[in-house]
Amino acid sequence: MDLKELKKLANALNDSEKRELVYFLQTRTTGIANQIRAIDEIQEQKHKDGLVCPHCKNHSLERFGKYAVKTRTGEVKRQRYRCNSCRQTFNDLTNTPLQRTRRPHIWVRYIECMIEGFSLRKCAEQLNDEVTHVTLFWRHKILSALKQIPTDAFQDIVEMDETYFLFSEKGRRNITERKPRKRGGKANYRGISHDQVCVLVARDRQKMTYSGVLGRGRIRTTELDEAIGRYLSDSNVLCTDSWRAFSSYANSKGLAHYRFKSDGKQRVKGVYYIQNVNSYHSCLKKWMDHFNGVATKYLQHYLVWFQYLDSKEYENTASNKKNMLVKSCLFTVTDTNTKLRISAYSC
């Protein structure tokens, strides 16, 4: 079969099959060129203020040769360092989500699947079953790193509102407190109860966003201050619904406050409204639906994931893929997949 016939066959493929063919050819021709460039970027970003030991934070280091890593696309040599203080050796990926990974050729492709918001099984399918969905649980190490990205202070008008997710122990065996639910299930009580997990979302008009799990049941004033108190100042104006915890918090901090009742009769007071944060809630819940339920202990990770996608306007570009991979390697992650799995929600 000559090249012309191959081109005709490729032209008959649908868009999804064409993407898979492109991915196949890239991994067989350029090898790990894209991944090497990503590693170079990680190295540059991590060491822009000088080399630091990830174990003892000492700056007195020395290069300690290179070591080879065997991958499915060949052998890769990476720089090793040694700390002159604690004498431990490390490399550019030590204590990062990419530490000890043996499949660098799928990194960027997997990040692409994350930006698309695919489930673990869908990701494995998109990667041509090169890895199982169990291996791809690795994404929680990436999200553990992104969770550490600091939130900037809010500016001017800040919309704030809470939403609720059903408390879930998805994946846990031998639940004795209640009957196991199927496909999410329903709460035991009507309205807001201990069966619900409160998620607070605060967002200014520049789209700076905070989203975090506060606890089970109704939101409380003390939880508000612990969550976002450090991001607010006297110059901010709060726009919230009429729940009393928001009013109490605004009064205790001396903040200007506009309230909107849930009856929807008055949605706007001049430039003050809460439509932006409500729209964020709606998009978040719609995005979460295709995961068929999320274990509460991982809920904060999913909030961080969605917040990253929202900040990048859901664009699956080369720049966004590289940024997500590099950003996740600038923060320390020491938890293993096993430790993440056996962790428990506590609040």
Image: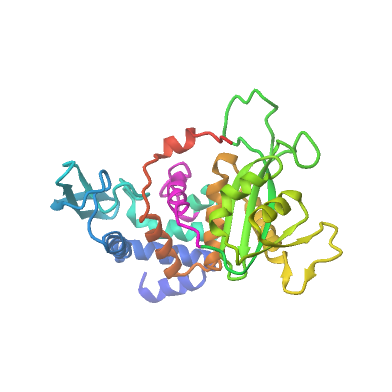
Compared across the picture, whether 29 is left or right of 311 comes to: left
Query: How many marks are shown on the rendered structure?
Result: 0
> Hey, which quadrant is residue 165 in on the image?
top right
Look at the picture and state if 161 lies above or below 171: below
Confirm whether the magenta stretch covers residue 139. yes
- In what quadrant of the picture does the C terminus appear? top right
Give residue 57's position: percent from left, percent from top. Answer: 26, 48
The residue located at (45%, 67%) in the rendering is: 320
Residue 192 seen in the figure: yes
The answer to which of 98 and 265 lies nearer the viewer is 265
Q: Which colour assignment does the render follow?
A: rainbow
The answer to which of 342 and 86 lies nearer the viewer is 86
Residue 118 seen in the figure: no
Give residue 202's position: percent from left, percent from top. Answer: 62, 58
Look at the picture and state if 74 lies above or below 239: above
Please, which residue is most extreme toward the bottom here?
A: 4
The residue located at (72%, 74%) in the rendering is: 271
- In what quadrant of the picture does the N terminus appear? bottom left
Confirm whether the magenta stretch covers residue 111. no
Compared across the picture, whether 160 is left or right of 113 comes to: right
Compared across the picture, whether 24 is left or right of 233 comes to: left
The residue located at (62%, 65%) in the rendering is: 236
The answer to which of 196 and 263 lies nearer the viewer is 263
Give residue 258's position: percent from left, percent from top. Answer: 74, 63
Give residue 4's position: percent from left, percent from top. Answer: 39, 76
Range drawn in magenta:
126-152
The answer to which of 23 and 173 lies nearer the viewer is 173
